[in-house]
Amino acid sequence: MNVLVGVETVLLVVVGILLVGVLRSHAELLRRLDGQGEGAASAPRWSDTPRLADGLPQPPARDAAEAFDIAGETLSGDAVKVAVLGVQGSTLLAFLSSGCLGCGAFWEALGALPEVPGGARVVIVTKDTELESPSKLLELAPDEVPLVMSTQAWDRYGVAGSPYFVLVDGPSGRVAGEGTATSWPQVASLLRDAMADASLRSGADRHVGSDAAARLARADGELASAGIGPGHPSLYGAEADDGRN
């Protein structure tokens, strides 16, 4: 009996020592975490904005209305450049991919040569061969629509995913509208809206110009009816009259 009591006593002592050690470790951990919380404001953090290596310039931010010519390769591997700046009419850039599930409807629609509002020409832009399946593109690409493989164009226009469409106004060299869609009728609707907005803006500018011309003509008519024409002394003020006297 005494032996059992002695064993129990030893076990209780061992458990107590272990418990004290665990409690000390836990307290130390809490103390360290609390200390880190106090210094969190001054601790360095990763920036939300990606940074390049020291000494390399940051890429310039793209103007939302800035457009670029498309340079890349054809499916046959030939270098090609499609000018969209300084040309007559508009160009609809269709950013599609061979692996894009949502692009299927557009590959089919463009193969049927749909009517493009405003008569804009269509250019399909895919990524380079390293990121596409050339054999699949050969199956999908319409014969009558130009296709340029250019990852650079995706980067320059800030295209994050496909399908994506950018309407470039050739004479001004600016982006008239851009966005994504799920069907060709939706793209056509977006094009009509963009052209209507552009027409309203240009019409407002012409209206302002015509109003100014009308006011000027009306003022000239009122002066003429009062006998005041070019060279009349009243047009030069008192100082001019003194100078002539």
Image: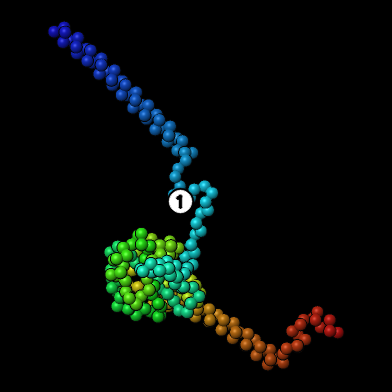
Q: Residue at image x 52%, y 51%?
A: 56
Quarter of the image where one finds residue 72: bottom left
Q: Is residue 191 left or right of residue 173?
A: left
Identify which residue, 117 or 199, lies in the foreground.
117
Residue 187: percent from left, percent from top:
35, 73
Element class at badge 1: loop
Residue 37: percent from left, percent from top:
42, 36
Residue 13: percent from left, percent from top:
25, 14
Residue 92: percent from left, percent from top:
40, 73
Q: Quadrant of the C terminus?
A: bottom right
Q: Quadrant of the N terminus?
A: top left
Q: Is residue 2 left or right of residue 159?
A: left
Q: Residue at image x 49%, y 64%?
A: 63
Q: Residue at image x 29%, y 66%?
A: 136
Q: Is residue 186 left or right of residue 152?
A: left
Q: Residue at image x 41%, y 78%?
A: 120
Identify which residue, 17 or 170, lies in the foreground.
170
Quarter of the image where one finds residue 244: bottom right
- Name the kind of residue labelled 1 in the image: Thr
How many other residues sit within 10 Å of disc 1, few (<14), some (14-19) or many (≥20)?
Answer: few
Q: Which residue is mark 1?
A: 49
Q: Is residue 15 visible?
A: yes
